[in-house]
Image (cartoon, rainbow, N blue to C red):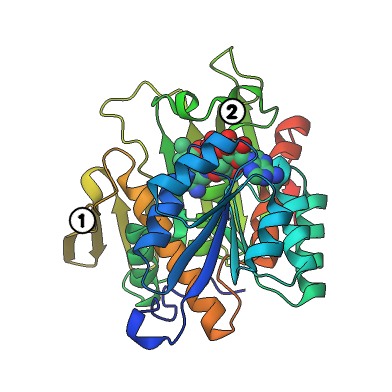
């Protein structure tokens, strides 16, 4: 199957729509402030309610983001507010029940990555939304980062020919566990938390995967799962890619949360390195593009690139909903990325190559 195109219908502008999409957010923890800021900035969205099991978090979010209603019970919120779209920003264990709740009321839903704790849960979520005839999108934001869209556009233009080899790399020593302490206890850590983004990018750039071999290690002895992974993918297109990630790199400068991408093609090559410089070579031609994006009022370094892509991911969700098309990172699409995560754990355990 050909990789997805870089183009998607333009984000909704306020002037193009008669009514705004009423959005309700479930989960007001560490990462939710980015979703809430983005919903408030998106002209097509009206943030109508927030919900968190922890009342103080729901109340703080409602106050900080000027949201008119707050709840501690998602079912109550849905019954009372009847939102047009629910955005689930909780950790994965709660996703299935919350998605089922939305599907029961035929409400379109976006759910943060990782989609769920198991492939069985993810498949059940896809089925229940399919049965209800409602949109299910996974908030897989890395492919919506500006540099990644630009790389996809360069590939689509044929500038470097057909991709034959690539590396997608995220190596950091940044203390992610300070903001996300639940990561200490994850039995399946870096592939499910971070590798999932990179495996999705591998599909985005090189198409579907036929073979996978993975090797994992645990460097920080305080965590339960693996915190270093190196995955080799064989794509149906004939290309080979390497996905590698760690939360225990000692490299300086530390590029967190930037993803490095190298792609070699039949006619040229591209390389995304530090400072968001994209180097593109084809024959005698060589140019370096600045693929950074300006800060928004609510984004800041070092998180800016990740925060900024939250806006574009949510803009895509609004466009999909208004246009009646499946989002690029629909639940059904994300099952393919999730299958690679499962494959990585299977391969690391068995020491063998996994075939899809
Ligand atoms: P968190 O634990 O800080 O916040 C989750 C919140 O959800 C908590 O306040 C919790 O009380 C609430 N919650 C849980 N179950 C609920 C329920 N049934 N109803 C209402 N509220 C409920 O977690 P976080 O760090 O904000 O992460 C949330 C998700 O976002 C995770 O899946 C994480 O992997 C993901 N994440 C994604 C990115 C990205 O770039 N895409 C970055 C960071 C985190
Ligand atoms: O994407 C995530 O969930 C985050 C981070 C970007 C730090 O890896 O854990």
Q: Nearer the viewer, residue 283 or 17?
A: 17
- Viewport quadrant of the N terminus: bottom right
Q: Which quadrant of the structure image shows residue 342? A: top right
Q: Position of residue 212 (x, y in %)?
A: 66, 47
Is the residue at mark 2 in contact range of ligand 2, meaning its CB lies under 8 Å from it?
Answer: yes
Q: For mark 2, what is the residue?
A: 183
Dot 1 falls on a residue whose secondary structure is: loop
Q: Which quadrant of the structure image shows residue 163? A: bottom left
Dot 2 falls on a residue whose secondary structure is: helix
Please report the residue visible at 52 percent of the width from the left and 37 percent of the height from the top: 57
Q: For mark 1, what is the residue?
A: 294
Please report the residue visible at 42 percent of the width from the left and 24 percent of the height from the top: 175
Visible in this render: residue 261? Answer: no
Earlier sequence position, callout 2 versus callout 1: 2
Q: Position of residue 184 (x, y in %)?
A: 60, 22
Badge 2 crowding class, 10 Å Cα cut-off, few under 14, some 14 to 19, many 20 or more, is some
Q: Is residue 211 left or right of residue 16?
A: right
Q: Position of residue 133 (x, y in %)?
A: 75, 78
Q: Position of residue 166 (x, y in %)?
A: 45, 53
Q: Is residue 154 left or right of residue 318?
A: left
Report the Cα–Cα distance between label 2 and label 1. Answer: 30 Å
Please report the residue visible at 58 percent of the width from the left and 13 percent of the height from the top: 222
């Amino acid at each position: 199957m050909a990789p997805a195109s870089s183009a998607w219908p333009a984000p909704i502008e306020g002037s193009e729509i008669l009514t705004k999409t009423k959005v309700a957010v479930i989960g007001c923890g560490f990462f939710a402030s980015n979703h809430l800021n983005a919903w408030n900035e998106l002209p097509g969205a009206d943030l109508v309610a927030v919900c968190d099991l922890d009342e103080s978090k729901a109340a703080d979010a409602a106050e900080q983001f000027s949201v008119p209603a707050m709840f501690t019970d998602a079912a109550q919120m849905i019954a009372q507010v009847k939102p047009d779209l629910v955005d689930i920003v909780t950790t994965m264990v709660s996703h299935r029940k919350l998605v089922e709740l939305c599907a029961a009321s035929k409400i379109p839903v976006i759910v943060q990555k990782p989609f769920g704790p198991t492939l069985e849960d993810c498949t059940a979520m896809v089925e229940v939304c399919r049965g209800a005839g409602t949109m299910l999108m996974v908030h897989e934001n890395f492919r919506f980062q500006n540099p990644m869209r630009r790389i996809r556009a360069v590939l689509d233009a044929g500038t470097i020919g057909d991709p034959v080899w690539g590396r997608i790399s995220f190596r950091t020593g940044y203390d992610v566990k300070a903001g996300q302490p639940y990561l200490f206890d994850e039995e399946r850590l870096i592939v499910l938390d971070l590798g999932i983004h990179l495996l999705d990018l591998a599909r985005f750039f090189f198409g579907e995967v036929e073979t996978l071999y993975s090797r994992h290690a645990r460097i920080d002895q305080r965590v339960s799962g693996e915190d270093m992974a190196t995955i080799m993918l064989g794509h149906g297109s004939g290309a080979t890619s390497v996905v590698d990630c760690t939360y225990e790199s000692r490299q300086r400068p530390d590029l967190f949360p930037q993803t490095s991408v190298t792609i070699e093609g039949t006619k040229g090559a591209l390389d995304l390195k530090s400072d968001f410089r994209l180097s593109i070579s084809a024959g005698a031609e060589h140019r370096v593009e600045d693929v950074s994006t300006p800060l928004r009022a609510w984004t800041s370094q070092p998180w800016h690139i990740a925060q900024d892509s939250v806006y574009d991911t949510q803009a895509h969700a609004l466009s999909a909903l208004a246009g009646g098309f499946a989002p690029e990172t629909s639940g059904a699409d994300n099952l393919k990325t999730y299958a690679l995560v499962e494959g990585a754990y299977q391969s690391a355990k068995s020491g063998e190559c996994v075939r899809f």
